[in-house]
Image (cartoon, rainbow, N blue to C red):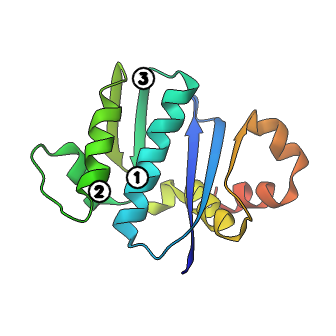
Amino acid sequence: MVRSGLGIIARNWCGAIVKAKGITERRKGEAATEETLAIRGALEMAQGAGWTNIEVQSDCKYVVNLINTDNVQECRLQTLLDDIDVLKKRFESCTFSFVPRTANSCSHELAQFAVKATRSFEWEGILEYLAKNKIFKMIMYRSQ
C-alpha cells in the first residue's frame, strides 16, 4: 500500500488561516477519490467547529462539477458524493467552487506534509503554531 495525504485549510472571511488538518492514510487512490475524501473531511471539520456558512474550494474541477450537479451517477465516487450531499445540508450556506492549483497550493503542500507525517493531525490557533514550527512555516511561505 502507498501512503497518501489529504490537506485541508480553513480560512476566515479575511483569508487568514484559522484551522488546518492533515489526514495520513495507507491506500492507493485516484486523484478524484482523494479530492472527494478531502472535501468530505473539510465538511466534517467545519461541522465540528460549528461553522454555519462555508465555501469549499477545490482544484479538482471534475469533483466540483459532480458535487454541483444533481443526479450524478459516478460509481467510483457515489458513496462519497452521497456523504457530501448529506453533510452540505447541515449548513445554512455551503457552496463549492473550483480554484486553480496556484490558488490552492497551501492545502496541496499540507497534503504533501501529511504523506510524510506518522499520523493525522489537526491544528487550531494556527498562527501560534506557525510561529513555533519551522517546517509548517516553510510550507506556508512556499505556497504563497
Q: Which residue is mark 3?
A: 53
Tell me the kind of residue under disc 3: Asn
Q: Is residue 24 visible?
A: yes
**SS for dot 1:** strand
The residue wearing badge 2 is: 63
Give the spatial CA distance, label 2 vs label 3. Answer: 21 Å
Residue at 57% of width from left, 26% of height from top?
Answer: 49
Name the N-terminal-most of marks 1 and 3.
3
Q: Is residue 80 shown above or below 4?
A: above
State the separation of the CA atoms marked 1 and 2. Answer: 8 Å
The answer to whether residue 13 of the structure is visible from this angle is: no
Amino acid type, mark 1? Ser
Q: Residue at 34% x, 23% y: name it.
A: 93
Residue at x-position 66% and y-position 62%: 114
Provide the secondary structure element on which disc 3 rests: strand
How far from the left and from the top, in percent, is residue 84?
A: 32, 42
Q: Check the image and name the residue furthest to the left.
A: 71
- The Cα–Cα distance between marks 1 and 3, rounded to whole angstroms, is 17 Å
Q: Is residue 103 left or right of residue 3?
A: left
For disc 1, the marked residue is 58
Q: Quadrant of residue 134?
A: bottom right
Q: Are marks 2 and 3 in contact (CB under 8 Å)?
A: no
Q: Position of residue 108 (x, y in %)?
A: 56, 61
Image quadrant containing the N terminus: bottom right
Q: Is residue 103 above or below residue 14?
A: below
Q: Earlier in the sequence, mark 1 or mark 2?
A: 1
- Image coordinates of residue 121 in percent, x first then y, are 69, 50
Q: Is residue 125 left or right of residue 31?
A: right
